Amino acid sequence: MTRKEKSNEETSLKMMSFGALEEEELDDNDTKGERYRAKDSAISPSALANPSLLRRTSSVISVGNVSQRLSSKLRRSSVEMQNSACEETRTMPEDYASPPPGKEDVEFWKHCRNGDIGVRLSPLNTFQRLVGNAVSGRQKETGDVPLQRPFHFESELFSGKCVFYFRNVPSAPEEVFNGKARKIQICIQGKFKEPVPIDDLMFGHSMIRPMVNLPSRWLLALATRVCQAFGAKYAMTLSSPSATRPFIRAPLILAAQTICVSKPGEEPDVTGAPIEDTSLLEYMPNDLGHAERRKYISKYLKQVKTAQSKKSSSASTEPVPEVPVYDTENVYTFCFWQAQIDFSKYICDLGIAQFKLFKLVDGQPLAANCRARDGRVAFRFELWHASIVEAARRAFDYTRYEKLEKALLGKKPLVSPQPSKQ
């Protein structure tokens, strides 16, 4: 496969990552927590699709810079492909996903005024579960979560609450989306059950089958120019969509649009405007915005890895820095949003063209998936649409699912975190 063909294929997988493309930046009022202030997007997909603008943008990038960036991306991609090859030999959380929804589930989504959209925790059992007195028997069995309002859950690595906001459905709250281009907003808040290195927890989307019916190469090439204007800030790595198990992911600490770290009892309201505040983290400078946080963390992790590499190749006895961890004392709030995918219609709009996702995903739902590299789950939510349910049920391997479920019988159940001692 040529480099150009590989780039074309990578583009279609970028379109599948609902949290990876950001259509708007927070202004000072958002960062300080003012509730849902209307603002104009600094850069819109339609503006990036303007051919004259693309020509002006490309004209100021030197060939040397492009070569240097491409070389760096290829090196990172090589390492990630090795990691992916190792993962293919292991059974990952997506392999344990619950059986697809049925017609009665689709009707339930509509009854709840959520249109054709349904979201659920998957897999369940020893991986994650809904908690709280308001959880019904049906929810315990299916993992279905309410939309447009908070709910509580816990997993192998995390315990907290979450809220999903979707645009263009009857239950959508206007105040969340007024003045915004975003089509979806997710806020996840809680505490980690054990320390996890910040470079070990990855956020993204993984599939168990290749994508199908990919668009024509020339259209993918054009879409690449639009997508690449967004993706670099997240340190995204991705496979080919024709890979056995396509994926797209980035470190959680870089993928989240905003991160707020708080002392217990001082955390922000998950139904309010997203807030960026990492001042409690000792390894972070104070008063960094979300863009500055990404730049600082990327540079910091490179420095740590370089120091560790030099240490391993020399006889030096000088101490080297450790990769920071998500601690278990503070409350973390992660917020994500994007404007390219309209989940109410299951369409991806890059400005230059619209793509009907049900034709591409082969019955596989998009997922907000956060896990450690060893497969342990922080959270994994499947985002379903009625248009893929029938194909999903045809493709699902029920025999394999039953075998995997039996293999989990000896696994320890989830343990709820103990309250901290005062």
Image: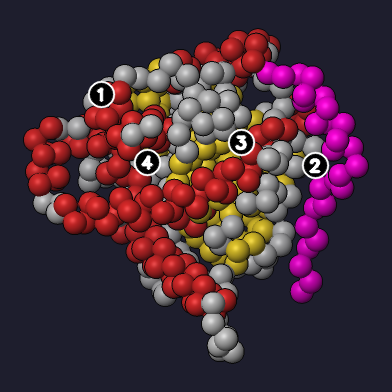
Mark 3 or mark 4: name the one nearer the start of the chain. Answer: 4
Q: Secondary structure at mark 1?
A: helix
Q: Which mark is residue 46?
A: none
User: Callout 4: helix, strand or loop?
Assistant: loop
Report which residue position mark 1 lands on: 218
Instruction: Report the quarter where the C terminus lies.
Output: bottom right
Query: How far across and down, in percent of the image, does residue 143 sit?
Result: 71, 31
Q: Which residue lies at the image location 60% right of the left edge and 67% below the top edge? A: 325
Is 294 or 83 nearer to us in this picture?
83
Q: Can you tell which mark lies on residue 381?
A: 3
Asked whether the beta carbons under mark 3 and mark 1 sit within 8 Å of each other, the answer is no
In the image, is residue 401 part of the stretch drawn in magenta?
A: yes
The span from disc 3 to disc 4 (Cα, nearest Å) is: 18 Å
Residue of label 2: 126
Asked if the residue at tag 4 contacts the one at tag 1, i.e. Cβ–Cβ closer than 8 Å, the answer is no
> Is 218 one of the magenta-colored residues?
no
CA–CA distance in space, label 2 to label 4: 32 Å
Q: Secondary structure at mark 3?
A: strand
Q: Quadrant of the N terminus?
A: top left
Q: CA distance from mark 3 to mark 1?
A: 33 Å
Residue 133 can be seen in this image: no
Q: Is residue 137 left or right of residue 369?
A: right
The magenta stretch is: 396-422
